[in-house]
Image: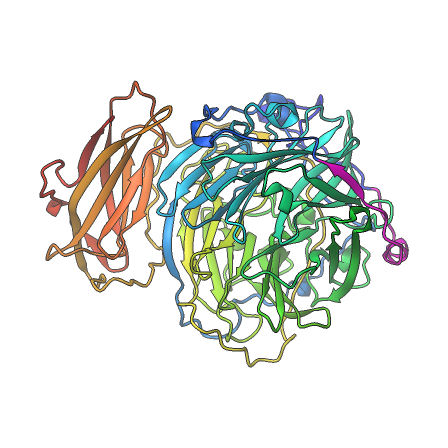
Amino acid sequence: MIRRPQTYVGPAALLILAFLPSFVSPSSMAASSMASNNPPVVRDAVQFDTSPLLKEMTPIPPRKAEADDAEKLQRRPLPRGTYSSSPGQGGSGSSGGIPIARSPDLVQSFEGIGNVNGVLPPDPVGDIGPNNYVEMVNLSFAVFNRSGSLLYGPVDTSTLWQGFGGACQTSNDGDGIVLYDHQADRWLMSQFALPNFPNGPFYQCIAVSQTSDPTGAWYRYQFLISNTKLNDYPKFGVWPDGYYLSVNQFNCNFLGCFSAGAGVASFERDKMLNGQSAQMVYFDMQSTHPELGGMLPADLDGPPPPAATPNPFVQVDDNAWGYPADQLEVWEFSVDWSSPSASTFTSAGTLPTNSFDSNLCNYSRNCIKQPGGSALDAIADQLMFRLAFRDFGDHQSLVVNHTVDTNGADRAGIRWYELRNSGGGWSIYQQGTYAPADRASRWMGSVAMNGAGDIAIGYSMSSRGIYPSVRFTGRQAADPLGQMTTAEGEIIAGSGYQTSSSGRWGDYSALTIDPVDDCTFWYVQEYYAVVGGAPWQTRIGAFRISKCGTSPTPTSTPGTQTLTPTATSTPGGRNTPTPNLTPTMTQRQTPTSTGMPTATQAATNTPSSGTLTHIGDLDGHGQSMRNGWVAEVSVTVHDATHGPLGGAEVTGIWSSGVPSTVMCKADSSGICTVATGVFSPAQSSVTFTVVDVSGRSIVYDPASNHDGEGDSNGTVITVVSP
């Protein structure tokens, strides 16, 4: 979040500044690629401590962003300052060219955090652990259980830093990242701190949970990144020997912020897992490789690689920016904690890709079409979080994605690729463009690979006739290379759009792997349920591409697919105060599951065509919390014979509190559970009302709702404070 100095002119005329980039010629890029590695900066954490239990700390309610917190988003400077767009460069405009006979399996969908801080963009990010899903958006976070019940928050992210002191406590500047470290069974949460913007110093705040419980105690660290260069757009990756970071650096003054190259770092994970004094190894790459930007560090899924394996970083380059070809650059970070100054960050090669066109709307922030309002930001000039790594023993894989123009007419699609290393270095194993033959744009993606080798992509979708929605697709390991072969799934259908003229969207999302089965994908993304300046919401969904049995080996010839990279960094901070948070529709539209793919049911009592469904029981209770209480309701779904109906999705409304609208999915016993946020002790009760039960071939019959225990009418139940 970069605060706009002296240029904020009010919500109706949000001014976005653009500055001339400091261009680098192709010849200087070639020379810099041969340059010797510059020495790293090695620093101890400025301060560190152990927090009290988070659940016993005073929650800081989400605070609205200040009017002078408007941000300028700047891109990574393009080397030549000119770029071309050729209509034929977009790659395949289809989903893969083979019949789609397989449907994905949506197993969970629930509401995440909304725009509680009044900012743009949301920066939705989250990860799944054995018991919890932790979500961060710009300036706030929340903790859910795996069924989607809200356990903690949303609260200002500064809640986590209470009593710590320094910039991490006093600044709540956003650009948040949350990751579950599955090898250690811990959580990592981070955001940057810019206490004297536009002047330094500039910090990175990192917290590592003391246990697997995200509502427990945390080890907290504040690292000085630079006294002069802002650490914008920080992206993390978990690795056995460190927590790795990439940033887009900027020199800032009262005129604005100007690109200062890439920065990469490793933080001493072993020490941080034990709350001990920890070091940072940082490379400022501007002087030796000024063309670098928009890099991502690898984030580990599955088993660890062999000891001392360097962490791979990747960025993408468009030949229209002056590079010799469309390409991926792979770099390797080798950290040496016994002698940190001996650590290296070196090039591991350049991988030419099939041609692509990263120029959407001349890189304008207003590009992706909606049914109304201003067009949305494509951010088509850099890789999208995460760079997911997996070691299969006989080879290692990296998957990543970015946004491209698929038809030369500013229709966005998702370019994705899998890199492999079988011992002889990295190469592109497969690459493709996901862009079904319709008029919609798909962008702001996140890609991951599970333990069976399935690859999935979650993303936003929008057009003049489709509200921005959250969708996903995928492929199994044995499918023809370079193709997404499952039908497109929907986590939530939007029913509104953004009217803010800023165009901000994203700036990223997160697709992660369930550590319990190493199979299920969990995705978080923004959408709109109503029309307004920026009443964005987030949705968290879980889905499967296969049952994750033994993964066969693809028989197709490697390298037959196209991939396109993009290289650029998104500078300038993260959150812009919303120009107008008042929706033009005065009544909230309740999201439904209409049109959403339904999971393959594991229950023996599976909905069949025209299955009549009703509520057979509602049970509610209040649970005491340190600062109030939480209401929880268990819903039992029955079929026409009063047997339990697994897989049905229940939508309900709380009479007060956040979230107001909730969804849950019945397990094999026909039961699902919803919960509220924390109420103050002054609130004596809250009412929950079932408004819909849905699913494949389900017909909801509310007139048949009942409750044998008599504590509700089967549709409405009141929960009193404990």
Would residue 176 be seen by someone viewing this image from the given angle? no
Q: Is residue 622 above or below residue 471?
A: above
Q: Tell me the quadrant of the picture where the N terminus can be found.
A: top right
> Where is residue 631 shown, x and y percent of the image?
28, 32
Residue displayed at 40% across by 63% down? 104
Relative placement, left or right, of 537 versus 291 is: left
Identify which residue, 361 or 351, lies in the foreground.
351
Counting every numbered tag in the picture gives 0
Q: Is residue 55 above or below residue 560?
A: above
Q: Is residue 666 above or below residue 422?
A: above
Q: Tell me the quadrant of the picture where the C terminus can be found.
A: top left
Displayed quadrant of residue 669: bottom left
Identify which residue, 377 or 180, lies in the foreground.
180
> Where is residue 182 shown, x and y percent of the image?
52, 52
Identify which residue, 109 or 158, lies in the foreground.
158
> Where is residue 511 shown, x and y percent of the image?
51, 53
Q: Residue furthest top?
A: 682
> Where is residue 26 shown, x and y percent of the image?
86, 56
Q: Specify the segment rendered in magenta.
A: 22-44
Relative placement, left or right, of 485 versus 353 is: left
Relative placement, left or right, of 125 versus 282 is: left
Relative placement, left or right, of 6 versus 94 is: right
Residue displayed at 57% across by 69% down? 392
Would residue 444 be seen by someone viewing this image from the given angle? yes
Residue displayed at 67% across by 72% down? 422
Identify which residue, 434 or 514, lies in the foreground.
514
* The stretch drawn in magenta includes residue 517: no
